[in-house]
Image (cartoon, grey):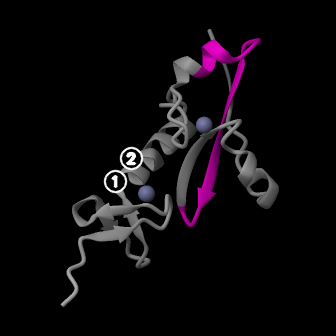
Amino acid sequence: MVHLCCKRCNWCSRQRPLWRVHQLTSGQNICDHCLEWHIHATDFLNGAVPAGCQACGITWEQMRERTIGDEVRLYVVPKDGIYQLLCRRCVQPYMRKRHDLYEGKELIAA
Ligand SMILES: [Zn+2]
Ligand SMILES: [Zn+2]
């Protein structure tokens, strides 16, 4: 008998322990990490200060420090109803394939 200890997340493609993976009504699996970032992304769209980039882990504060000028951009990438929050560098691979990206709000660093 095969003991399944992990499930693959449909968004980040990582194998996660079962307790970290939730099944959506669509039948897709999403892990707690991606779900948390989806919530960050919707908060961001609603005007909250973003948590940062979910792919490389850079925080909003770090992005501001590394950006020359005062225009820091984040991109909201919709994928199967789930939003992903990515910095300019991490969004590049998506940019080539997709045209339905929301360009993140231009947040002016104060
Ligand atoms: Zn995931
Ligand atoms: Zn990034």
Q: Is residue 23 visible?
A: no
Q: Amino acid at mark 2?
A: Glu
Residue found at x 81% / y 55%: 96
Q: Is residue 83 visible?
A: yes
Name the residue type under label 1.
Answer: Asp
Q: Residue at x 77, y 59 (%)?
A: 98
What segment is highlighted magenta in the picture? Answer: 63-81
Q: Is mark 1 within 8 Å of ligand 1?
A: yes
The residue that label 1 is drawn on is 32
- Residue occupying the point 47% across, 31% down: 51
Q: Are marks 2 and 1 in contact (CB under 8 Å)?
A: yes
- The label shown at residue 36 is 2
For the point 61% across and 41% down, which residue is it?
Answer: 86
Which quarter of the frame holds ligand 2?
top right
Residue 85: image tag: none
Q: Single out the residue that lies furthest toward the bottom.
A: 1
Q: Is residue 86 left or right of residue 96?
A: left
Q: Is residue 109 above or below residue 105?
A: above
Is 9 placed left or right of 71 in the picture?
Answer: left
Quarter-wise, where is residue 19 in the image? bottom left
x%, y% of residue 11?
A: 50, 61
Q: Quadrant of the C terminus?
A: top right
Dot 2: element: helix
Vertically, is 19 above or below 84? below
